[in-house]
Amino acid sequence: MILGLVTLVSAEKYPAKDYLKIVTIFTNDIHGGIDRSEASFINPDFPPMLGGGAVAGRYIYQKRQEAEKNDWGFLLIDAGDFYQGTPMGTLSEGEAVIEYMNAVGYDVLTVGNHDFDNGWKNLKKLSEMANFPFLASNLYRKSTGQLAEFIKPYIIKEFQGIKIGIIGATLSSTPSMSYPEHVEDLDFRTEIEGLRRYMPEVRAQGANTIILLTHAWLAYNPEEGYQEVMAKLAEGDLPESYNSSAQAIAHTFPGIDIMFSGHLHRGFYKPWEDPLNHTLIFQNYANGSNLGHVNFYIHRKTGTLAGYDFESDDGTIFTLFEDDFLPDTSLGRMIDYWVQKSEAGFDEIIGSATGQISRSSSGESPMGNLMVDAMLTSTQSDVAFSNHGGVRADLPAGPITPRHVFKVMPFGNRIVVMKVTGEFLQELVEDRVAGSSRGMLVGGARIQIDRSKPDGSRVVKFEIGGQPLEKDREYSLVVSDYLAEGNSGYDRLTTVSPDRINYSGILLRQTIIDYIKNNSPIIPKTDGRWKEGK
């Protein structure tokens, strides 16, 4: 995987006497995923194991030591959404992840939208625990008009007299994805406003290479995302909803050499380069399944970025398979402590069922209905969709424990809420009943399908909340992140604009646990929400 040839070529192209090498390891959207986990996204039936933070930490230690030995610079950075999403991250309110990040020596973190999920006071507490700064150049207090006291707008890292400016920007659309009390008295200004205020200050201190560390996103399809930005610019100006696009920022604000982004949970092995300003945008995958690694070369005389290369033949990203990397034992013990603490009570009874809650490979099922109803309840959305293959087991009659629920939902899927039109919903259902496709699990709606009709016109009845579907109306749709990424034939979901998506970070299985607790005893039933026939 690691190429000795890359080192040789780089040494010839960027000789040490003229260029300083900066080894940069980056993460984003960890969502508490520092424990071992199964890579079900690769093989749901026989998933390989991911080593999590213990494996990542050992790699980080090794690369830092290598950098120190060779007089290279070294950066370890994160672009936000670092703790919310696993039992360990959520129940520790981020403390477990900060302890890990301190241990492996992060240099800096930019706060993401889900880092406010336990309120800004909790985020402030975590910033005080951290041995590194939290950045957000666009986060202000409404009451004072000053920057929030628990963040910094930027830092300057100096290596052998060369200064690198790292400016942070949180997601300006965070208030629309948070409870009002969680962001009370906080003013989320646009990312560009933060850059406009602090870029001159950073340059005045001698930094000729500028990094923007932001939770803004690189589009799922970068080329399409870029064309969308250009189309909006051609119309006159970018609307407010596009200000958080990493590509919009890079194209409309010159002077950013490198950008690390996040939010979308989609990683890219090669950076996107803006055609006008030549900003390089890097983005990793989510949930702690991998690391990003890129080496930058800075011209010693000018302090400017000269080039970059990769450590792997695949590009910047590599997956943390236990078969490929050894874990650090001390980090493993620390993480195991938090896992045991957070998973206490997994065999406690949370509720009961009056009969077996069974699943089905098509049509309605009691287990399928329970799952989508739990999704609706946890998010107060209008409609929920899921795939039959996502339900992996039945629930037994009698007492139910969290361990039973984990068998039903063994994957680390998280809930995603999208704002879409009624027309979009109808097209999505048509996708799932075209040809021999077996349909979907549905909550909040009643749908009738006539398979004797041609593809694209098989939905003959569609009600949401007891009312006929309105094609022009906006609805909130809740799905799993697995489906939001276009899997299982839900590729239409990848066309939803990122500013219309809320990656809640909430584990789907936790919503099922909560639903069983609050609605026990569960009576297995179907109610005719999905029908097929003329």
Image (cartoon, helix red, strand yellow):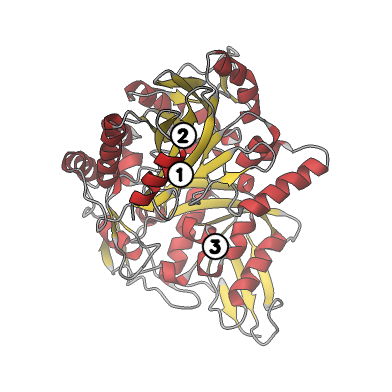
Q: Amino acid at mark 1?
A: Asp
**Could you tell me residue 429's position as x and y percent?**
62, 70
Q: Which numbered marker is on residue 309?
A: 1
Quadrant position of residue 334: top left
Comes first in the chain, label 3 or label 2: 2
Q: Earlier in the sequence, mark 2 or mark 1?
A: 2
Label 1 Cα crowd, 10 Å radius (few <14 / some 14-19 / many 20+) = some
Residue denoted by label 2: 297
Q: Position of residue 284 (x, y in %)?
A: 46, 46
Res. 129 image quadrant:
top left
Q: Quadrant of residue 371?
A: bottom left
**In the image, what residue occupies the spot 53% across and 57% down?**
484
Secondary structure type for disc 2: strand
Whichever of labels 1 and 3 marks the residue nearer the N terminus, that label is 1
Above or below — where is 144 with respect to 467? Answer: above
Q: Kindly check if marks 2 and 1 are in contact, taking CB atoms under 8 A apart as contact.
A: yes
- Label 3 residue SS: loop
- 476 or 79, nearer to the observer: 79
Q: Do the CB atoms of the residues marked 3 and 2 lie less than 8 Å apart? A: no
Q: Amino acid at mark 3?
A: Gly
Residue tagged by mark 3? Answer: 486
Label 1 or label 3, whichever lies nearer to me, is 1
x and y percentages locating residue 327 in the rendered image: 21, 47
The answer to whether mark 1 and mark 3 are in CB contact below 8 A is no
Q: 76 or 288: nearer the eye?
A: 76
Q: For the image shown, how many numbered marks are present on the structure? A: 3
